[in-house]
Each structure stands twice: as C-alpha cells, then as structure tokens.
Image (tube, rainbow, N blue to C red):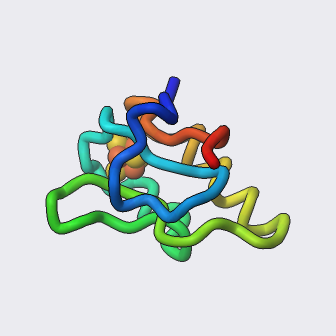
C-alpha cells in the first residue's frame, strides 16, 4: 500500500501520488499517460490529477496495476 508520507518530490498536489517504492516499470505511464510520467531519475510521478470520471477510472486502473503498490489515492 502506498504511503503519502513517502510521496516523491515530483508529484503534483492532489489525491493521486507515487511514493518511494516505485521501481520505474512505466506501466502507469502507459496505462494513464495523461496523468503519470517517468522522471529523469527513473521514478514515476503524477503529472496531472484527473478532473472527470474517465480520468479517475484510468488513474484507478494504474493504481490497481502497479506491481509494487506505489500509487496512492489518499494524497493532498
Ligand atoms: S506502475 Fe508502479 S512501479 Fe511501475 S512506474 Fe508506475 S508507480 Fe512505478
């Protein structure tokens, strides 16, 4: 389970985030490319928060698919 206290520095503020457990597999950026990207340091981050149901569905799909559960949905 992702930990919002371990959110990485690249995430935009808001509900979804990537924490320090990310292994940089890029699955989230491929599943929900409008919302997740890979930083120069190799970890994923949330580049934009979803603003509609379709975006939320994509972010939830990315969250559920992450192999190391590094994506959370309880951020601020
Ligand atoms: S799916 Fe998970 S481990 Fe893979 S890049 Fe995204 S946050 Fe990191």
- Identity of the residue furthest to the top in this view: 1
- Residue 25, given in percent of the width and then of the height, sits at 28, 49
Residue at 66% of width from left, 60% of height from top? Answer: 58
- Identity of the residue furthest to the left in this view: 41
Q: Between residues 10 and 27, which one lies in front from this camera angle?
A: 10
Q: Is residue 51 above or below residue 8?
A: below
State which quadrant residue 30 falls in. Answer: bottom left
Residue at 31% of width from left, 33% of height from top? Answer: 21
- Residue 19, given in percent of the width and then of the height, sits at 40, 40
- Identity of the residue furthest to the bottom in this view: 34
**Could you tell whether 53 is left or right of 72 in the image?**
right
Q: Between residues 28 and 9, which one lies in front from this camera angle?
A: 9
- Residue 76, given in percent of the width and then of the height, sits at 63, 49
Residue at 26% of width from left, 53% of height from top? Answer: 43
Residue at 63% of width from left, 66% of height from top? Answer: 49
**Could you tell whether 20 is left or right of 4 in the image?**
left
């Amino acid at each position: 389970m992702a930990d919002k206290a371990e959110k990485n520095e690249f995430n935009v503020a808001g509900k979804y985030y990537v924490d320090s457990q990310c292994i940089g597999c890029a699955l989230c950026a491929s599943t929900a490319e409008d919302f997740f990207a890979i930083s120069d340091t190799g970890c994923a981050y949330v580049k934009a928060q979803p603003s509609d149901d379709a975006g939320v569905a994509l972010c939830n799909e990315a969250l559920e698919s992450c192999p190391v559960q590094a994506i959370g949905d309880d951020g601020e």
